[in-house]
Image (tube, rainbow, N blue to C red):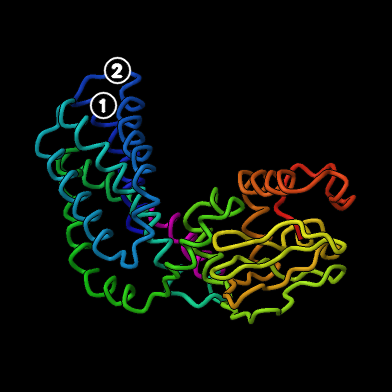
Amino acid sequence: MGQYVLVGAFDIILVVIAGEHLDLGAAGAGILTTMFGAGAFLSIGVAGRAVRRPRLAPQMLLALALIATACIAFGANITLLMAGLALPVLGCSRSLLDLMARVLLQRSAPPSQLASVFGALETSSGIGLIAGSLLAQTLIAVSGASVALVGVGCVYGVLAVSLIRPLRSADDGADVPVVAMSLLHRLPVFAPLPTLALEAVARSAIELPVAAGEVVIHQGDSGDRFYAVADGAFDVVMSAVLMRTVRRGEGFGEVALLADVPRTATVTATQPGHLLAIERGPFLIAVTGHDSSRQAAWGVVRSMTFDNELPDATRDEPTGTQLN
């Protein structure tokens, strides 16, 4: 909720600063908001790598400290130059804090409780916006925008200190599927997914050891899982014809799940190996919930099969995945 306090407060503070301190005219608030948004845009470049780390507490505490420092520095020296320095830092830190908080919640909460946890998060965001707005209006009315900025910075400083132990505790108990995430990220169907969605899929994956000669999928059976190859080699045979051999960093089983058709081929292990099995529900939620992953999935299907080999249900489908 703390990050939304910042957003709510700055909706008020930036308007006052633009008009009363920087003389930027009618477009002033928009200019300052753009500076804040530029920082959020820049955060995209580091967000993916940041949230893939096994421990997020140090980065979250750093983001809180940067917000506190930038607010206090801007409040002590309200100039256009300082705005150009402080606002991008605030926007970047706030965006990273939002993403890392969501990832840490996902890692820490039991899967069965995630829906209620994120529902509570959305509710708290509205409360935070209102609280930030009221805090800013009160401080501005009493002492001006400069004190409001310093006051918001102090709130974040206190928040950073008070959260050191809880964040470290959450990190210690977090379930971080780093190996599974790395493997799934190599597959075209999952590569476009946002980190939060990719981690959710990785957490749902089941590790399966497979013996040489074991049949994983039978042609004609109903499909209930997608498989990613962690180790070993698997022959894909369609109507007694060897179509390809699947190895580490590849997957099979998508068409049956996406098109709701029987398995289109038989897949047999040619040597001992390991698979990551992803059930129908988590797979479909991840892939069909993001246009880029759907398009990548059906692109893989069409690049690996002839059109007359695809099930009729998939011929006009613009999105999906691989063979089987």
Query: Which numbered disc flags the more N-terminal residue, 1 or 2?
Result: 1
The magenta segment is 115-129
Front one among 302 and 234: 234
Instruction: Indicate left or right for 174 with 114 as reference.
Output: left
- The disc at residue 18 is 1
> Looking at this rendering, what residue extends furthest in the left direction?
76
Please, is residue 13 above or below residue 150 in the view? above
Asked where in the image residue 173 lies, by quadrant, the reply is bottom left
Asked where in the image residue 52 lies, by quadrant, the reply is bottom left
Residue 247 in picture, x, y percent from top left: 59, 62
- The disc at residue 25 is 2
Gap between marks 1 and 2 measured at Cα:
7 Å
> Would residue 259 be seen by someone viewing this image from the given angle?
yes
Where is the N terminus found, in terms of image quarters?
bottom left
User: In the rendered structure, which amino acid carries the disc numbered 2?
Assistant: Gly
Please, is residue 39 above or below residue 52 in the view? above
Where is the C terminus found, in terms of image quarters?
bottom right
> Would residue 133 be seen by someone viewing this image from the given angle?
no
Residue 245 in picture, x, y percent from top left: 67, 60
Total labels drawn: 2
**Residue contact between numbered discs 1 and 2, judged by CB atoms under 8 Å:** yes
> Is 202 inside the magenta-drawn segment?
no
Instruction: Indicate left or right for 207 with 51 as reference.
Output: right
Q: Secondary structure at mark 2?
A: loop
- The disc at residue 313 is none
Q: Residue at x 83, y 49 (%)?
A: 314
> Is 119 inside the magenta-drawn segment?
yes
User: In the rendered structure, which amino acid carries the disc numbered 1?
Assistant: Ala
Residue 283 in picture, x, y percent from top left: 65, 63
